[in-house]
């Protein structure tokens, strides 16, 4: 992604813990000239250093979303915008703000990936609002929700001692969907230049809904200007076609049965179930890798639309996936990428959420970098109705830290085998999706 000096002002991120030596900040001016407290002090919304910074920067826009005009008409005419108009960057001054640094530090002196996922979702949401905003207070704003995450790839470790920058913009739009690309930039200590130091890349897909009817709503058009923007637009359009193709191919695949592949996957699992004493000691049943968390979704975790903040769900899913990889490998895992995330249905305040994880399969092609593929599924459970619905699916890939592996010369990642046809189908579906994405990347 191309970012130059003409980009909008970078939004500074500060810690959300008050400094005991600071005086109280003055009230801020809100809409219609009324005074209000900073958004960081508003109750009942999800707060983090990044959400606070983003909301304060565009407070008038977000206040309008919190209190939309009653019976206001929808936007009458779509606008044509450029990626530059939605481009937003945020800066973490880790080197100067020790409180902010402590909020993001993990045990290995790196940035907590779970918190970073929250921030990426919040920034992507802000970018989608920027692109869809018509700056007309007489029309009703759109309801913008995270539909999926295409890919999040960690390219190098992210230190918590060095300043960090996230930049992003809308790179493609469909009729009611927006593809947003984000890059996390961090310099090395030697160069102190963040412009070319991409540490992580992410692509979020947001969809627009009419805030009154709940139906899909058209979004403003996008007109790329630079050669780089045109290239990103073409690549995003190709990914959109690929997503549609995957849905068709998956349906055909399972209609045809895939009997031989299922049988091959289930062969070792049957030995575990029927003759456990003779099972391969370097393998483990998929069901024996399970971990689970449960929680009641609280008002403090909701977004400006009143639903549970997607970044919060991603954070919780990542922490469980990390724990699953840790318990499975016996060594500290190292995050590589979010392979895919689906937001299938909204999660509301008061919902009983069960988050279940397992090791779906492992890959051993590179003995120095074995891969652990984790599936996390979130269920909205309603005991009074005796119902349980899948709200989100997450797929993460981990390996193990080199320093941890070096301390354990006999380390070996076990093979995971399914014991039921349903488990085998889940494994095949994910393997095929990964294969299709890999082939698409090679063909570029």
Image (cartoon, rainbow, N blue to C red):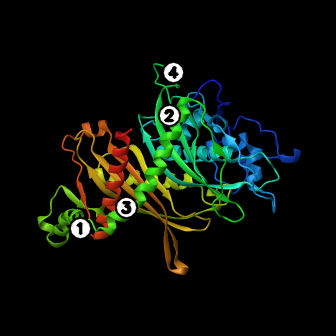
Q: Earlier in the sequence, mark 4 or mark 3?
A: 4
Q: CA distance from mark 4 to mark 3?
A: 46 Å
| Front disc: 4 or 3 | 3
Disc number for residue 250? 3
Q: Earlier in the sequence, mark 2 or mark 4?
A: 2
Residue corresponding to mark 2? 160
CB under 8 Å between discs 4 and 1: no
| Front disc: 1 or 2 | 1
Point 54% across, 80% down: residue = 385
Disc number for residue 259? 1
Can residue 206 be seen by looking at this rendering? yes
Q: Secondary structure at mark 4?
A: loop
Residue corresponding to mark 4? 192
Q: CA distance from mark 1 to mark 3?
A: 14 Å
Quadrant holding the C terminus? top left
Taking depth in this image into account, of 426 and 188 the one nearest to the observer is: 426
Q: Earlier in the sequence, mark 2 or mark 3?
A: 2
For mark 4, does the 10 Å Cα neighbourhood hold few (<14), some (14 to 19), or many (20 or more) residues?
few
Q: Earlier in the sequence, mark 4 or mark 1?
A: 4
x and y percentages locating residue 70 in the rendered image: 81, 61
Q: Secondary structure at mark 1?
A: helix
For mark 2, does the 10 Å Cα neighbourhood hold few (<14), some (14 to 19), or many (20 or more) residues?
many
Can residue 150 be seen by looking at this rendering? no
| Front disc: 4 or 1 | 1
Q: CA distance from mark 2 to mark 4?
A: 14 Å
Q: CA distance from mark 1 to mark 2?
A: 49 Å
Q: CA distance from mark 2 to mark 3?
A: 41 Å
Q: CA distance from mark 4 to mark 1?
A: 55 Å
């Amino acid at each position: 992604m191309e970012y130059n000096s003409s980009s909008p002002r970078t939004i500074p991120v500060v810690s959300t813990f008050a400094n005991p030596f600071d005086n109280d900040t003055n009230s801020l001016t809100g809409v219609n000239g009324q005074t209000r407290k900073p958004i960081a002090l508003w109750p009942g919304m999800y707060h983090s250093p990044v959400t606070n910074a983003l909301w304060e920067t565009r407070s008038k826009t977000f206040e309008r979303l919190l209190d939309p005009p009653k019976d206001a008409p929808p936007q009458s005419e779509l606008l044509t915008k450029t990626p530059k108009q939605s481009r937003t960057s945020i800066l973490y001054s880790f080197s100067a703000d020790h409180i902010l640094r402590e909020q993001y530090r993990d045990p290995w002196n790196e940035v907590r990936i779970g918190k970073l996922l929250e921030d990426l979702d919040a920034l992507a949401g802000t970018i989608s609002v920027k692109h869809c905003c018509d700056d007309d207070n007489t029309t009703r704003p759109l309801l913008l929700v995270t539909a999926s995450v295409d890919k999040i790839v960690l390219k190098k470790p992210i230190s918590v001692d060095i300043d960090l920058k996230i930049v992003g913009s809308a790179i493609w739009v469909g009729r009611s969907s927006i593809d947003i690309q984000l890059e996390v930039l961090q310099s090395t200590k030697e160069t102190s230049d963040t412009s070319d130091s991409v540490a992580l890349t992410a692509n979020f897909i947001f969809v627009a809904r009419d805030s009154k009817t709940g139906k899909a709503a058209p979004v403003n058009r996008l007109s790329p200007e630079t050669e780089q923007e045109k290239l990103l637009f073409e690549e995003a359009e190709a990914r959109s076609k690929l997503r549609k193709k995957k849905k068709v191919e998956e349906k055909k695949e399972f209609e045809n049965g895939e009997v031989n592949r299922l049988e091959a996957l289930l062969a070792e699992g049957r030995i575990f179930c029927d003759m456990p004493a003779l099972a391969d000691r370097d393998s483990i049943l998929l069901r024996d890798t399970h971990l689970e968390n449960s929680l009641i979704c609280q008002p403090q975790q909701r977004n400006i639309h009143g639903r549970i903040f997607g970044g919060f769900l991603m954070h919780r899913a990542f922490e469980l996936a990390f724990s699953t990889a840790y318990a499975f490998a016996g060594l500290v895992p190292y995050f590589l990428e979010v392979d895919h995330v689906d937001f299938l249905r909204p999660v509301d305040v008061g919902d009983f959420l069960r988050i279940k994880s397992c090791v779906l399969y492992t890959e051993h092609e590179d003995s120095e970098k074995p891969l652990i593929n984790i599936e996390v599924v979130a269920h909205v459970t309603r005991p009074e109705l005796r119902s349980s619905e899948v709200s989100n699916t997450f797929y993460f890939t981990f390996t193990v830290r080199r320093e941890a592996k070096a301390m354990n010369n006999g380390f070996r990642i076990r093979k995971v085998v399914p014991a039921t046809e349903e488990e085998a189908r889940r494994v095949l579906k994910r393997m095929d999706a990964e294969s299709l994405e890999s082939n698409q990347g090679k063909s570029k």
